[in-house]
Image (tube, helix red, strand yellow):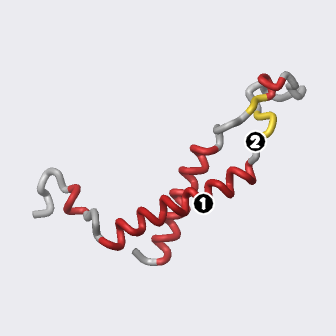
Amino acid sequence: MGPVSGLVLYVVIWAMTFLVALPIRIQTQGEAGEVVKGTHSGSPQQHHIKKKAWITTGVAFVIWAICAYVILTGTVTVRDIDWFNRMG
């Protein structure tokens, strides 16, 4: 795995982790009882994007480190997941 592919892998893991973290601990305007005129009651009251981005960065790094270790050491190879014996 080269540096660019490692960076791409990290960005993909970060984006997936961020999308998972977004709905965690959100209080909607409807739940808070203060719906701003012109918005949906399901809109977030406070979203804490900056805090979630920092937490996501740390979690994504740990996941990326595990994936990079598995890829670089060859623990799991393409031949290990060749279930139909097409690679000979």
Label 1 Cα neighbours within 10 Å, binned few <14 / some 14-19 / many ≥20:
few
Residue receiving disc 1: 58
- Would residue 72 appear left or right of 37 to someone viewing this image? left
| In front of the other: 53 or 59 | 59
Q: Is 12 drawn above or below residue 69 in the view shown?
A: above
* Residue 3, position as x, y percentages in the image: 48, 77
Q: Amino acid at mark 2?
A: His
- Would residue 83 appear left or right of 46 to someone viewing this image? left
Residue at figure coordinates x 85%, y 22% from the top left = 33
| In front of the other: 68 or 19 | 68
Q: Is 3 drawn above or below residue 67 in the view shown?
A: below
Residue at figure coordinates x 52%, y 64% from the top left = 10
Q: Earlier in the sequence, mark 2 or mark 1?
A: 2
Residue receiving disc 2: 47
* Residue 65, position as x, y percentages in the image: 47, 66
- Would residue 7 appear left or right of 79 to someone viewing this image? right
Q: Is 16 drawn above or below residue 73 in the view shown?
A: above
Spot the residue most to the left. 88
The Cα atoms of the two marked residues, 2 and 1, are separated by 19 Å
| In front of the other: 35 or 60 | 60
Q: Amino acid at mark 1?
A: Gly
Q: Quadrant of the C terminus?
A: bottom left
Q: Is 60 drawn above or below residue 39 in the view shown?
A: below
